[in-house]
């Protein structure tokens, strides 16, 4: 394996590259930011009395939006304030979504990282540092490094969820028979931990209830193609390594809610190793919720 030195490029000082170019590049493929499966909802979104939001991204499951502000060179006070202001406007405008502010800059100094960290304790905020590299032949590569993530929170989801009940019929209209069958199979698994647990149908997701009281150590989101299972359990290197060899289809780990997002198809439950790994993860979520 041969080593090749990488030449970095300052976007701010470049004659050929600009903030508009960076915004165009991200808009064409927002997944390069490393925020998961997101798509562009709108760019240069007008904020009444407050300028324009660079990029508004949305999770493919229509549950989360990202207010993204881009700046070349070092981040500064105006960049931070602008990002938080636009995040606040959007969350008030569309309260049914979870909103996360995203700062993108070429350099986030220790001083401003400390300032952002203070806001991060009360505002869901992600800071991404972008580096451009020269790939030769008029090609440029981009690397986005997450230098600050949203704060881990073990708060109960039901404290923030919309207070809208649903029923089995609501989810039957939204999901497939296969995903609901997988849901029923997972209910039998958690009832091995506590026989009193039952499904609690809500519009954002299907949670669990114990003796009529929500206990969402696991939540479920049946979809057309598969069942998404979200156990609330702390992320560790050992747990990540075990998941990697298990065959589980883990989409991401949501730091704010301390949940793994696991996609389960009907075929997955027929594979003994995968099913055993899923049941183990669910058991860990149950045990941590009991502490």
Image (cartoon, rainbow, N blue to C red):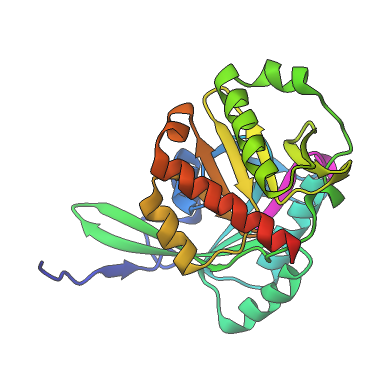
Q: Nearer the viewer, residue 147 or 176?
A: 176
Question: Looking at the rendering, in which quadrant would you find the N terminus?
Answer: bottom left
Task: Give percent across and percent down for residue 241.
Answer: 41, 61
Q: Nearer the viewer, residue 127 or 237?
A: 237
Task: Give percent across and percent down for residue 43.
Answer: 61, 40
How many labels, in total? 0
* Image point (74%, 61%), residue name: 290
* Image point (48%, 30%), residue name: 265
Question: Relative to 275, is 186 on the left or the right?
Answer: right
Question: Relative to 63, is 28 on the left or the right?
Answer: left
Find the residue positioned furthest to the bottom: 111
Q: Is residue 269 above or below residue 174?
A: below
Q: Is residue 277 above or below residue 107?
A: above
Task: Give percent across and percent down for residue 39.
Answer: 55, 37
Q: Is residue 241 above or below residue 171?
A: below
Task: Give percent across and percent down for residue 133.
Answer: 31, 63
Find the residue positioned furthest to the left: 2
* Image point (67%, 20%), residue name: 174
Say if residue 115 shows up in the picture: yes
Q: Quadrant of residue 153?
A: bottom right
Magenta includes 143? no
Question: Relative to 236, is 98 on the left or the right?
Answer: right
Say if residue 26 shows up in the picture: no
* Image point (44%, 49%), residue name: 32
Q: Is residue 24 above or below residue 238?
A: above
Q: Quadrant of residue 16?
A: bottom left
In the image, the segment drawn in magenta is 92-101
Q: Nearer the viewer, residue 246 or 52?
A: 246
């Amino acid at each position: 394996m041969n080593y090749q030195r990488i030449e970095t490029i300052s976007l701010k000082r470049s004659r050929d590259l600009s903030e508009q170019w960076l915004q165009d590049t991200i808009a064409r493929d927002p997944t390069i930011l490393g925020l998961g499966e997101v798509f562009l909802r709108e760019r240069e979104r007008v904020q009444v009395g407050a300028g324009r939001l660079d990029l508004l991204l949305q999770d493919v499951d229509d549950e989360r939006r990202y207010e993204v502000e881009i700046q070349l060179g070092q981040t500064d006070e105006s960049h931070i304030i602008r990002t938080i202001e636009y995040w606040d406007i959007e969350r008030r405008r569309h309260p049914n979504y979870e909103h996360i502010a995203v700062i993108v800059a070429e350099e986030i100094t220790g001083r401003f990282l400390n300032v952002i960290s203070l806001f991060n304790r009360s505002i869901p905020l992600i800071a991404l540092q972008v580096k451009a590299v020269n790939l030769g032949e008029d090609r440029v590569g981009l690397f986005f490094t997450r230098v600050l993530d949203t704060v881990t929170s073990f708060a109960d989801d039901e404290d923030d969820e919309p207070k809208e009940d649903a029923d089995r019929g609501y989810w039957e209209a939204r999901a497939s028979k296969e995903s609901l069958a997988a849901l029923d199979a997972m209910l039998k698994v958690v009832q091995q931990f506590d026989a009193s647990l039952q499904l609690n149908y809500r519009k954002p997701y299907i949670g669990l209830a114990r003796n009529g009281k929500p206990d969402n150590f696991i939540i479920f989101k049946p979809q057309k193609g598969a069942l998404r299972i979200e156990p609330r359990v702390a992320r560790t290197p050992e747990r990540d390594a075990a998941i990697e060899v298990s065959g589980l289809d883990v989409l991401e780990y949501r730091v704010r809610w301390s949940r793994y997002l696991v996609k389960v198809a009907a075929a997955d439950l027929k594979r003994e190793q995968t099913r055993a790994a899923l049941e183990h993860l669910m058991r860990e979520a149950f045990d941590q919720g009991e502490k």
